[in-house]
Image (cartoon, helix red, strand yellow):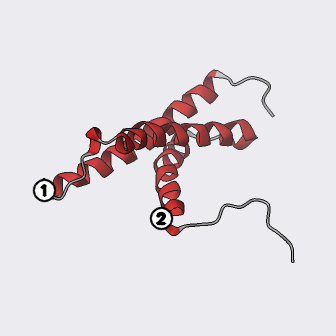
Amino acid sequence: MHDMPTLHDAIITIIAFAGGWIGVVFELMELSHTPSTKRPKTFKDPYYKLRFFGLPFIAATLGLLYQLSNFNLTPVVAFNIGVSAPLIIKSFIRSGVNLDLDPKTE
């Protein structure tokens, strides 16, 4: 286990952030195929601003957590984690997954 994050850890975190950001940008690029009358407000809506900036930070955090857990990520894997993290989070939210970590025994 690491005592302090190293430069390599920081680089992996930045790469995971970039992967998360590119995933969000691709999603916004898909909106260009939607007629302007049916498009969401995107940057006029605080929710979209939060998603645009928040999801890449979550991806970076996940990449750093993997790295600090001695997974020794390569840049390609860190980028893949970054791209995947927002998609996984959105699928959890859409599916209504119960994230109760304290299950009650009967």
Question: Which amino acid type corresponds to the residue marked 2 in the rendered image?
Answer: Arg
| Residue that numbered label 1 is attached to | 37
Residue closest to the far bottom = 106
Which corner quadrant holds the N terminus? top right
Q: Quadrant of residue 69?
A: top right
Which corner quadrant holds the C terminus? bottom right
Question: Which amino acid type corresponds to the residue marked 1 in the rendered image?
Answer: Thr
Q: Position of residue 12 (x, y in %)?
A: 57, 33
The residue that appears at 41% across and 44% down in the rendered structure is 51
The residue that appears at 47% across and 64% down in the rendered structure is 94
**Separation (CA) of disc 2 from disc 1:** 24 Å
Q: Give the camera-side residue of 77 and 59.
A: 59
- The answer to whether 105 appears left or right of 63 in the picture is right
Q: Give the camera-side residue of 77 and 14.
A: 14
Give the SS element for disc 2: helix
Question: How many marks are shown on the rendered structure?
Answer: 2
- Name the mark on residue 94: 2
